[in-house]
Image (cartoon, helix red, strand yellow):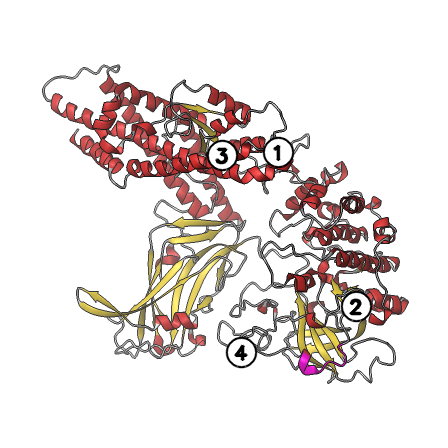
Amino acid sequence: MLDAQKEAEAKIDLLTSSNGPLVTGIYKISSLTKEVKTKRQLLTKKLTNIQFAAKQFDWTILLDAASTLVSLRADPKSIVDTVKQGYEIYKKVTDESTAKNLHGDAVKKEYIIDQLAQCSDTLESLEKAFTTRKDNQIEIDDPGALKIMATKGNIQKILREFKNAIVEKDKKDIESALDDYIAVTLNRNNAVLDYNSSLQLLFEASNAREYSKSQAESLGQRRHTLDPNTPAILFWLRKTRDNMRLQLMQRLNYESRAIRFWGLKKHLDYSSPGPLRSFIELRDGQSKLNAAYEDSLNSYANNIRVTWPREEKEKGLFYILSHAELKAFKQRQRLTTSKGDDGVYSASIRLEPGAPPFGPGRADVRINQVRLWLLGVEVKADNAGRKQLMVKIAHSGNETLENTDRQALGFSHDAVNIQFEYNTAKVQTSDDFKTDVVFGKQGLENDWSGGDSKPTASTFAAIGPFTEWRFSIRESENVGLDMRSVTAAYVEFRADKIHSAGRKLDMIDIPYGAVIDDEWRFEPITLPCEWVEDYRPGGYHPVVLGDIFNNGQYKVIRKLGEGSYSTVWLALHLLYFVVHCCLFRFRNRGYVALKILVSEISGSTTELRILRHITEVAPAEGGRHITRLLGEFEHHGPNGVHRCLVFEPMGPSVNTMVEELPQFKPRMRGMKIRYPLRMAKSILKQSLQALAFLHENGIAHGDFQPGNILFTLDDIGSTPEDVLRQEENVQAESISPPVQRLDGKEDKWAPRYLCVAQPLVPFTYYAEGFKVKLSDMGGAYFFTDPPTKPVTPLGLRAPELILTGAVDNTLDIWSFGCLVFELITGQPLFCIPGSDFEDDDHLLSLTDRLGALPDELFKHWKTSSLYFTSERKLFNCQLGGVAPGEEPLMVEQTSMEELFDQAGPDLDEEEARKVKALIRWILQYDPAKRPSPAEILSDPWFCEIDVESESARV
C-alpha cells in the first residue's frame, strides 16, 4: 500500500508542478481564448455583410456551434463516452471547494468542460448537437462551455459545406477569416480537452493516494469485507482495469515505433495523447500492428537490398568536408577532464536524403560502416611503426529515413557512438583508403538490415545516414597528434539500401533508353547547368569556350542552352564564305548555333531525317517556320561519337523571353508575368502556322511546347566576336567553379568547368512584327511512323496518351489547345509535377477542368476506384487513395472557363468568350473530333490576328 501511495503522490506532483500539464494548460487556454474572441469579432463583422445562397440560412447558430468543435483523429464516440464517465464520477464526489482546496491553484474550475457531444460531417448534425446544450449562463466562447467532438475529416466537410452556402462573389472575402477562426478555435478547444484529461488523471491519483493511506491504516486493525459495490472496492477494480489498459497502450506504442523504424510505415502512430482505449480498440490495434509487422518482413524479403561497396576492398560513398568545415575541424579546443586539460578537434556534418553523397533513388539506407579519413594528419608511431589514429563518431539519434515511395519519416532514438581507427602511415592519398589499413570492425554490421534469418527480440535495426554526424579526435587518445598539416577530410559510408522508384524524370528531360548512372563521381555544382554526372561514355561531349570543331570550321564562343540529350552553343563560322553562302540566303551568317547530341543517340536520328526532308521538299517555306538546318558533322570525343547539327542562331524561347521583357524589370510583387495580348496572339498564330506546315507534310512535332518556340534575332552578322563571347568568370557565375571528382582524380570525360546558358536576349527582336519559329525536332515523327514513347511534357499530354498510349498527330493539337490557355492567361491549364501518381493527378485535373471522361477512356483508368464510386461519383481527391484511418479529401472543382476568368486575362468579355469556346473546341476527348491546324487557323478569332510578314527577317 505504501508503494501505491508513493506512486500516486509522484503522479500528483507531476501533474501539478509548475511545468506540469495543468499549470501550462491554464496559460495556453487563457491566451488562446482571447485570440478566439478577437477572431470571432472580426469574422462576425465580415459575415454580416455577405450573402448566402439560401435566404433562411442562420449563420449565427452555426458560428456559435463552430466555436465548440474539438478535432479528433479517431471516431469520437468511445472518447466521448470515456470522458463523460470520468467527468460524471468527478462531479459526484467533488464540489467547488473540493476542486480548489484539494488540488490548489493548479485546478481552474471554469476550464472544466460543462457538457460533451459529438457530430458527424454535416452542418445539420453540428447544429443539432449544439442546440441540445444545457440552458446556462456560460458564454459559448468560454473554455468550460459545451464541446462537440468530430474527426478532422468531418470538420473539413462541415467547413466546406459552410463555405459553399456563401455566394461565389463573397466567398473570397470570407474564406481566410473563417479558416483562421476555425484553426485557433480547434487549438483552444483541444487544449481544453487535454486539460480536462489531465484533471481526470489528477482526480484518480488523489483518490488512489487517499485509498492507499486508509487501507494501510485499517487493514492491520480489522478484516475488510470485500463488497464490490462499495466505492473503495469499485475504485480498486477500475484502477486495476485502467492500469492494464495503460500498459497495453504503452506496449502498442512501443510496437508501432519499432515497426515504423524497421518497416518505414508512415501511418503507424500510437503515441498521440488521449483517453484510455476500450478492449475492442486495443484488440484492433494489435491486429493492425501484427499485419504491419508481417508486411514489413515481406517487404524485406521481396525487395532486393543492394550493398555497397560490392567487395570489402572497394570504396564506399564519400562526403568531403568543405574548406570552411575543414578549417573549423583543425581548430584545437580545450577540454577539461578529471585527468586535466585535453585537446580535442571536432567537426559536424548534416546529411539529407537526396543530397550528396547518396543522391536520389536510395530507399531504407542502413549503415554498415562509417569512416573518417584525413590526409596530412600526424601521430606518433608505435613500436611496430604504425601510426594509429582513433576517431570518435557520434550519430545524433534524430534521423530521417526514406521508404520505397520516397516518403521521409523522422525518428528519434538514443545517440549511437562509433569508434574508427586506422594506420595513417599507410594513407598518403585518397587511393589508400582501404580496409586493410583499418583496425577492427564496427559493430554496426551486427545490426539487422535484411537477410535470411528473422530478427529476434534482442536484434537492433541498423541506423541510417541522414542525421547530424559529429567527429572528434582527442590528443589524449592520439599521442603526438598534429592536425595543422591536414589538407582534406573524407567521410566514407558503407551501407545497403533498397532501390526506390528512383529519380523520376519527365520524358522531356531524358530520352527513352538513356542510361542513368547510379553513383556520383563529382562534387555537386549548384549553378543552373546540365547535370555534371551526365558527362560519361554515352553522354555529353565536354566543351569549354574556345573549342574548335569540324576541322577548324567552328569556334565555340557562348553557351545558348542545354537539354538532357544535347548542349547548344553559339559558334563563330570561321569558313562561312566557303560553305553554304552560295546556296542559302540567310542572316547572321558569321555565327551559327551548334547542337551537340549525346553520343548514345547520335546515330541516324529521326530528327535529322525530318530536317533533311523539310530541306528537300520545302526549303523556303520550311525556313519561315522551322529553325533552319545549315549542316551536320560527326565529332569524336572521350564519351563517344557525337552528331553535331548546325542551325541558324536564334534567340530565347517563348518559355523564358517573357521574363526578359522590360515591363517586368525590376520585378515587383504582385506582377502578372505574361505576354502582352498582342504578343501572345502573334506567338499563337505563328506557331500554329508552323504546325500546319509540318502536318501538311506528314510530320508531327511531338514536343509542341513554349520551350521549343524561339524568337528570331536582330542581325548579329557584323557584331564583333568579343561582344558575343561569354566570359570565363566564376565570380560572375557565367561559368562554374572547376569540376572536381570526389576521389580527387582528374576526369577525362568531363570539361574543366560548366558554362551557364546565356541566350542572346540583348540581340532578340520582340517589337512589332517579331518572328518566332518552331525548333527542336528531337521528338518529331512522320505520321506513318509514330514512336511508342513520345516525349510530350506531363502537363501537355492528351488523355488517350495517358490511358492507352495511343500516339498520332492530334497530340500536337491537344498541346496547342493547352498553349492557347497558357499564353493568354499566363498560367498552365494543367500543372502536373512528376510523382508516383502523376497520371492520376493529370486525370483528376482533366475531369475537374474539362468534365467527365468518356466511358471508352475511363475503363482504362486502372486506379479510378481510389477516387470514384462504382457509379463514377467523385468521393476522394487524395492522390494514392485514402490512407487507413483517414478521411477522403475533397477539393472544390474548377472548370477551365472558371480558371480562365480567375486569371483575369486582358480581354473584354466577348473576346474572352470566343477564346474559351476555341479552347473547348480544340480540347475534345475524342481525337477524331479535334480540328486540324488549318481548321483552327480559319477560326474567326485567328483570322483577326494580323501577323506582319517580314520575309527579310527570315
Question: Which of label 1 and label 2 is nearer to you?
Answer: 2
Residue 190 in percent (x, y) is at 40, 34
Mark 3–mark 4 contact, CB under 8 Å?
A: no
Question: Which of label 4 and label 2 is nearer to you?
Answer: 2
Q: Pointer 3: residues within 10 angstroms few (<14), some, or many (20+)? A: some
- The numbered disc on residue 746 is 4
Question: Pointer 3: what residue?
Answer: 152
Gap in angstroms between the C-alphas marked 4 and 1 = 58 Å
Gap in angstroms between the C-alphas marked 2 and 3 = 56 Å
Q: Is residue 902 above or below residue 713?
A: above
The earlier-in-sequence mark between 1 and 3 is: 3
Q: Is residue 46 above or below residue 386?
A: above
Question: Pointer 1: what residue?
Answer: 875
Residue 13 placement, left or right of 610: left
**Which amino acid does the dot numbered 4 rest on?**
Glu
Residue 413 in percent (x, y) is at 36, 50
Quadrant of the rendering where the C terminus is positioned? bottom right
Q: Pointer 4: residues within 10 angstroms few (<14), some, or many (20+)? A: few
